[in-house]
């Protein structure tokens, strides 16, 4: 199976033809990324679901935030590593490599973020995202305070929690449907 045949193990063909707005979005992806990410193809069987997914993703990962795009991608990779989500590890590992300019950092985060040379801010952020992934019900005020102690505002903590929560959801959907990463991700920023 190639990534252009079926993005998942489910037989959910893309709407054909795509609505003009969706086609325009896919054209922008092709122009900027050189591909249409398979996660978008997977959701394109239902344009309302695709729109909801892309709206949430774009808000969490691309909108204004005190978290850098790299930090948000780092959260995505750490959560995906704990959940062993092949699709997200490949796709967001490539984004970490590209945004950081450091292929070793991307690999460290994929394998075990604790071996990466991170500052206190990023370490606390990733520790929080990891705890949220493993035992979210055990998060208490001291966990949030550790983030404040390294300079995160309450709004930043909201953003960390939402990025981690989003990837916990998408990891489970990607794994359950055997979503395949685009081949192009594997070679990016190496």
Image (cartoon, helix red, strand yellow):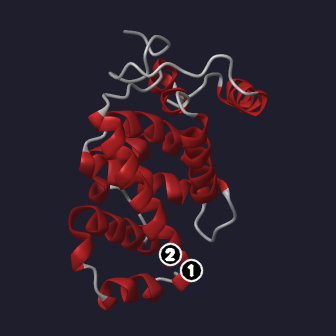
Give the residue pinned by disc 2: 158
Against 60, residue 2 (above or below) is above
- Residue at image x 40%, y 39%? 88
Residue 155 is labelled as 1
Q: Nearer the viewer, residue 2 or 82?
A: 2
Against 77, residue 43 (above or below) is above
Residue 116 shows in this picture = yes
- Residue at image x 28%, y 61%? 133
Which element is circle 1 on?
helix
- Residue at image x 68%, y 59%? 63
- Residue at image x 28%, y 86%? 140
Which element is circle 2 on?
helix
**Image coordinates for residue 83, horizontal then vertical, percent:** 26, 48
Q: Nearer the viewer, residue 22 or 81?
A: 22
Q: Residues within 10 Å of mark 1 (few under 14, many from 20)?
A: few
Quadrant of the image occupied by residue 176: top left
Q: Nearer the viewer, residue 100 or 139?
A: 139
**Image coordinates for residue 170, horizontal then vertical, percent:** 40, 46
Q: Nearer the viewer, residue 160 or 47?
A: 47
Whether label 2 touches label 1, CB < 8 Å = yes
Specify the quadrant that holds the N terminus.
top left
How many numbered callouts? Answer: 2
| Residue at mark 2 to residue at mark 1: CA–CA distance | 5 Å
**Image coordinates for residue 152, horizontal then vertical, percent:** 52, 81
């Amino acid at each position: 199976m190639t990534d252009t045949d079926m993005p998942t193990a489910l037989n959910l063909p893309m709407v054909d033809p795509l609505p003009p707005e969706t086609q325009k979005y896919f054209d922008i992806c092709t122009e900027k990324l050189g591909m249409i990410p398979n996660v978008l193809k997977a959701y394109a069987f239902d344009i309302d679901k695709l729109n909801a997914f892309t709206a949430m993703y774009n808000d969490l990962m691309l909108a204004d935030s005190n978290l850098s795009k790299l930090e948000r991608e780092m959260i995505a990779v750490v959560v995906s590593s704990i959940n062993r989500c092949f699709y997200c590890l490949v796709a967001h590992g490539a984004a970490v490599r590209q945004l950081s300019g450091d292929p070793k950092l991307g690999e460290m985060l994929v394998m075990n973020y604790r071996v990466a040379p991170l500052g206190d801010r990023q370490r606390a952020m990733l520790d929080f995202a990891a705890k949220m992934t493993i035992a979210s019900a055990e998060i208490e005020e001291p966990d949030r305070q550790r983030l404040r102690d390294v300079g995160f505002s309450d709004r930043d903590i909201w953003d960390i929690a939402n990025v981690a929560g989003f990837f916990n959801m998408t990891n489970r959907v990607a794994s359950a449907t055997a979503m395949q990463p685009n081949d192009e991700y594997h070679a990016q920023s190496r």
